[in-house]
Image: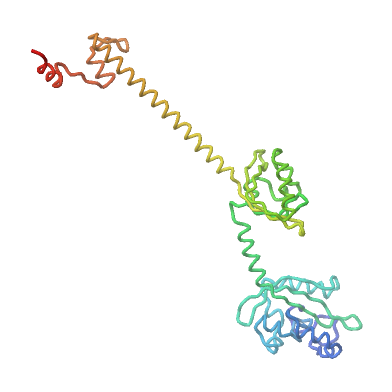
Amino acid sequence: MGYGGSASAPPGFPFAMDQSTDLLFSESDLFQNAFLHAAIGMALVSLEGRFLKVNRSLCELLGYTEEALSERTFQDITYPEDLEPDLAQVARLLAGEISNYRIEKRYLTQSGGIVWALLAVSLARDEAGRPRFFISQIKDITSRKAAERERDALFDLPLFLHGVVGFDGYVIRANPSWESAFGHPMEVWRTTPYYDLVHPEDKAAVAEAVRTLGLKKDLIRFAVRVRCADGSYAHTVWCARGEPEEGVFYASGFDETPLMEAQEDLRRLLREKEGLLAELQRSNSEITNLRSKLLTICAWTKRVRCNDQWMSVDEFLVKELGLHLTHGMSAEAEEDFMDGPA
């Protein structure tokens, strides 16, 4: 709305910028009623940006009275970062390059807050075709912008794969996790049918899944392998909801390849553990068997050859097996001997 921040008229316009718009209202009661009682904000704005007439909806949106707004220009209440884009469109409108324009911009309210609005502007001209004033429609979209911020925050969460996919076979929008998971830049997804990046053995299942989404039936935990930039395949799991009227379906998933690899590593470690345990049991059994045989041998010989050396049975048992033999009669044997027949 408006043109620049100066109170003077742009060069080439011979009439005063603050001329009354009452004639416009007197010529059309229908326009006056539509203007005053519109559910969205409406304003007639001079070429230099001053509010000539405003309706109640705009006053309620911005928190100003009609009188207070009439003392201000749209430049005064535009969020600073949004002023330049607005002025650029105004210049094009006055130059005759466009007949109207629509932009999203922020306004500063009387209390110092910020509201987002969808602004639509057209230019009223006199019978000679000279610009008279701007007709502006201002719709409050603050709630929508807040919802968009929340959506984008969730959409861009790392680890999860979120995407908007067309039923025509191309990915329309994907979050950064797609590139980190698969290695393909976004341009590849926009220009390559996603079927081309699906594992050959999964293509039929994917085609059936897309048909299901076309019937507005949700998919839950749908597994598919996707080819990565390095030629490997990522194991992914998805849930999705189709909106065939819009020609798209919304998908959310995750790459479970790292989890599968971790599970395989765990299974491998368990197999190795079981193998080591079995080997230990075999070794223990062999040692037990060897001990029993050596004890038998020790009963019949006084010397044993081990590692090309002869040694006494006592030395062998201590050095090789860690066993100690006692000599003489045990207490149990002595008791049995004394209790035997006379």
Q: Position of residue 262 (x, y in %)?
A: 53, 41
Quadrant of the frame with the N terminus = bottom right
Quadrant of the frame with the C terminus = top left
In this rendered view, identify the residue nearer to me: 307 or 278: 278
Q: Residue furthest right?
A: 128
Q: Position of residue 73 (x, y in %)?
A: 71, 82
Asked if 88 appears above or below 294 in the picture, the reply is below
Q: Residue furthest left?
A: 342
Q: Position of residue 203 (x, y in %)?
A: 72, 42
Number of numbered discs overlaid on the protein picture? 0
In this rendered view, identify the residue nearer to me: 191 or 277: 277
Rendered residue at 70%/54% (across/down): 217
Q: Position of residue 137 (x, y in %)?
A: 76, 78
In this rendered view, identify the residue nearer to me: 253 or 210: 210
Asked if 152 appears above or below 24 in the picture, the reply is above
Could you say which quadrant of the image residue 58 lies in?
Answer: bottom right
In this rendered view, identify the residue nearer to me: 40 or 329: 329
Q: How is the image coloured?
A: rainbow
Asked if 140 appears above or below 339 in the picture, the reply is below
Q: Is residue 281 left or right of residue 124?
A: left
Q: Is residue 172 left or right of residue 235?
A: right
